[in-house]
Amino acid sequence: MNIYIDVEIPSRELDGKLLLATLAASKGHKVIVSNLSEILLGLKKRILAPGIFHTTSLVPGTEKIFRHQLIIDNGSKITSMDEEGGLVDHGYDKFARIRYSNQTLEQSSATFGWGPEDTDTLKRIYPTQSNKIHNTGSPRADLWKSNFSEYWGIPQNVPDRPFLLVSSNTHSVSSIRPFYQNIKYLKRLGLFQSDPELFSNQFKIAAEDSLKTYKFIEAIKYLASNNNGFDVVLRPHPIENIEAWKVFLGDIPNVYIIKKDSITPWVNNAFAVMHNNCTTAIEATVSNKPVVTYIPFKQKYGREIPNELGHRVETLEELSQTVNALFDDMKSDNQKNMDKKIPEIVSKKININEDELAAEKIIKVWESLDDKSLSKTIYWVKFYWLLKIIDFRRLVGKFKRKLSPSRFGSYKENHKFPLLKKHDIFERVKRLQHVLGIEEKIECKLLSDRTILVKKS
């Protein structure tokens, strides 16, 4: 079967989707992992044969509905798992109404839920589509389990001393994309129609984020000067501009600002995770890592569930005492005595099954959808050269924009999807094979700097 997996933000999604690709390839399927434009062009040109197109969401925007209909008309079937997850607030009704519709669910052949809450809510709100909605769990959450710690290993540029990981989520202030462009993007998706309060709330959230950013700068400075011998690693959100944080924190000793790749190895290797309003708190909780939730002022727009987890502190003095105590516990090995039970507010959001991976469940659903029309031969050489032409045109466009921005428009880097590196991707797939115990020979090719082919040799 042909499977095309869309990746929007590699630092968030790539490893989970490589897990899907590696498992699927071991079962004889041919898998493309890429960004939307490359997959879509291959399908439009009919160079890519019909297959499963696995997308990052079913948001009911006009552009997405039109695009998905083109994919269906070309003979492919659409499946989805919403990468935003809806993990951070109690309940799921509002998220379900904004991020889905009867029309987008009708277009899909299967939708996968992170856990029991989102699955049950979607079935209740969209009862005519309930047979398509599956409580599989997420491949991203698969990788939070302890048996994948060998896959992650120790991240590059890790400090010599033990470190506190600070996960930032203040992108209204430090986003790569200017605030007005974010408003433009949400408008294009049609989200302001689905949620009439969303427009005004974006401005209020940005105002609150500004104060929170300052409070976190203040806290990091305080911890850098009042600690028992640890460093601080600040991890910007995937859509935040690392240069902004370098300006905010660049002159503070023992503070490292690192954004490359997934946050998971940093969670695994930190002695604790500090956050406010961040999904990483949920990941750290699942991974049995101490969480410090810093709430220095009364927030109206703080996410409910992350901010209820771990050690909740409100002052700099409380923060320092708590973090230093966790550091001392780590040195004395007391963290091994932590309660490993996942809180109910997390377990209803995320389906963690120790007996079967979410990725395995998703592949079983994909296989049930194949009627042989999704297994036709793909001429990989044609697709390879199509991608080469795209890369050449992109390079020419980049050169023109840099040479004459007034004529061709200024050049903008794709910060959400940085270029993939051949050795790095090959090593990830090899590590996944090792952890999963896959003995079949898996072939991994980088068809372009944003497109990966994974299949049996």
Image (spheres, rainbow, N blue to C red):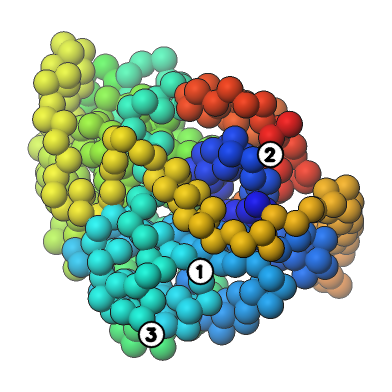
| Marks 2 and 3, the one that precedes in the sequence | 3
Residue at disc 3, secondary structure? helix
Residue at disc 2, secondary structure? strand
Viewer can see residue 348: yes
Q: Pointers 1 and 3 in contact (CB under 8 A)?
A: no
Q: Amino acid at mark 1?
A: Ser
Q: Quadrant of residue 359?
A: top left
Q: Amino acid at mark 2?
A: Lys
Q: Residue 331, percent across and down? A: 21, 13
Comparing 433 with 208, the one in front is: 433
Residues under labels 2 and 3: Cα distance? Answer: 40 Å
Q: Give me the disc on residue 455.
A: 2
Residues under labels 1 and 3: Cα distance? Answer: 23 Å
Relative to 257, 449 lies left or right: right
Q: Give me the disc on residue 194.
A: 3
Q: Callout 3: 10 Å neighbours few (<14), some, many (20+)?
A: some
Viewer can see residue 70: no
Q: Callout 1: 10 Å neighbours few (<14), some, many (20+)?
A: many
Quarter of the image that includes the C terminus: top right
Residue 447 lies, with reference to residue 432, above or below; the image says below
Q: Nearer the viewer, mark 2 or mark 3?
A: 2
Comparing 184 with 20, the one in front is: 20
Q: Amino acid at mark 3?
A: Ser
Q: Which residue is mark 1?
A: 109
Please name the residue shown 69% across and 77% down the image.
73
Residue 319 lies, with reference to residue 104, above or below; the image says above
Q: Pointers 2 and 1 in contact (CB under 8 A)?
A: no
